[in-house]
Image (cartoon, grey):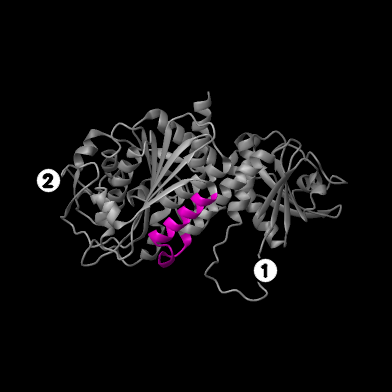
Amino acid sequence: MRVRSTTSSPRDSQADTIVVGAFDGEGIPHDVEGDVLTGLLESGEARTRFKSLAVVHADDLRIVLIGLGKRDEFDAERARVAAAVALGRASELGTKVLCWELPHKLDDAIAAGFVEGTLLAAYRFDAYKSRGADDEPSGPQELVISDHGDRSAIVEAAAIGATATNAARDLQNTPSNDKTPTRIAERARKLAAELGLDCEVLGREQIRAAGMGAFSAVAQGSDEEPALITLRYDGPGATGPVLGFVGKGVTFDSGGISLKPGKGMSDMKFDMSGAAAVLHATEAIARLQLPVRLVTVIGATENLPSGRAVKPGDIVRAKTGVTIEVINTDAEGRLVLADCLAHARDCGAERIVDLATLTGGIVTALGDQYAGVFATDDDWCAAVTAAGEVSGEVVWRLPLHPSYADAIKGRYGDIVNSTESPKASSISGAEFLHRFVEDTPWAHLDIAGVADNTGRDYARKGGTGWGVRLLIELARRSASTSAS
């Protein structure tokens, strides 16, 4: 969808549908002739209740009037939801060019929310659907944001972020037979060439040679070549600490020898959602030319059972020299991330955040609205949390504690990759990863509950691209902090 902003009135935007929002207790600032919209509200045919919709034709205009609720409760996330709801109705009406008339006195984050909600809700994944000769794209093909002030910069940035999120969703939704580690590496190389990033990809033998025995152990069960992908971005004028984004990229997770139940296993194509997020967040950060230094690390592999697969009871040695007793081969993501986190540190990362669909326990604890965050540094955790509040990708902090670290001590190796007890599984998983960041400020985001099928108005089914916009905002805030 094309996106543009204008300071002209919606009538002059050449849109065939205009969306007007109404807050509780506030009038319509720019009503059409005859105060038609005000009349709809006064008659009760339209309401200011959040997400309430009404459609009217007046002055040769087609107008969707949507309730925005109380102004003091309205934020960027509500803007995304309102935009998604309005888009749904506009699409039913056959809209081709949609114009949002922004309510007065909204901050930039809320203005961006209208753009993001529209683009995210317009997303469709139909690459594998058969098409007829007469099939045409459904829904609006252009979005116009109309406001008195110049919002062009914020609109453009929001469009870049939402487009990157949708690119991550494409990668998530792609079936695993077409989403091999090699294909992800190819995508990374293509983006690097386009955006001027440094890109290095290591294959199976190079990963082994680098001493990454934990990553190698997961990869050895599959014929597909694994890929350790490292991207570097040095933004113009960047002076702050080097950020490290690390993403779990298990392109299909069968559980390995500790085989998962068959029901729902098809969704294990989403086990690379962390990789999709860090890859396309890096893309957006480069397109926005944010003044940060960034190293992005992706560990991409399949986890399959075979005669070569790692077995429960095996002991492997990570890049740091730590030995790991494999208790459960379905706790594979932390094995991959152990070496990737160490690699990010070796590449100079001074502030690290990793994203991983790591544990089912986080879904039990937090459901599909919050991701869990675990952190070694309060300031870094606060920055991650604040970025999530702005992006609508909210996180809830859970503890790290020596007693949980004790739970992963091994009998035969230094540590185990899974405890026998189901208690605090997300925390013990985070404590496992904690061993590999040492004293580097680090935040671990367990996104197993939010990566797909969240039911949100703008991302109901399939991959959500969760984390792309959080990481962009985190980079933006890091750049701002460094500048000050």
Residue 148 falls inside the magenta stretch? no
Residue for point 29% across, 38% down: 434
Residue for point 33% across, 61% down: 225
- Packing grade of label 1 (10 A; few <14, some 14-19, many >=20) is few
Q: Depth check: 346 or 269 in front?
A: 346
Residue for point 59% across, 40% down: 76
Residue identified by numbered label 2: 411
Point out residue 173 in the picture as x, y percentages from the top left corner. Answer: 47, 61
Amino acid identity at mark 2: Arg
Q: Quadrant of residue 346?
A: top left
Residue 250 shows up from this direction: yes
Residue for point 53% across, 41% down: 391
Residue 453 shows up from this direction: no
Amino acid identity at mark 1: Glu
State the extent of the magenta-drawn residues as a range.
173-194
Point out residue 188 in the picture as x, y percentages from the top left corner. Answer: 46, 53
Q: Depth check: 452 or 308 in front?
A: 308
Residue identified by numbered label 1: 136
Point out residue 62 in the picture as x, y percentages from the top left corner. Answer: 79, 55
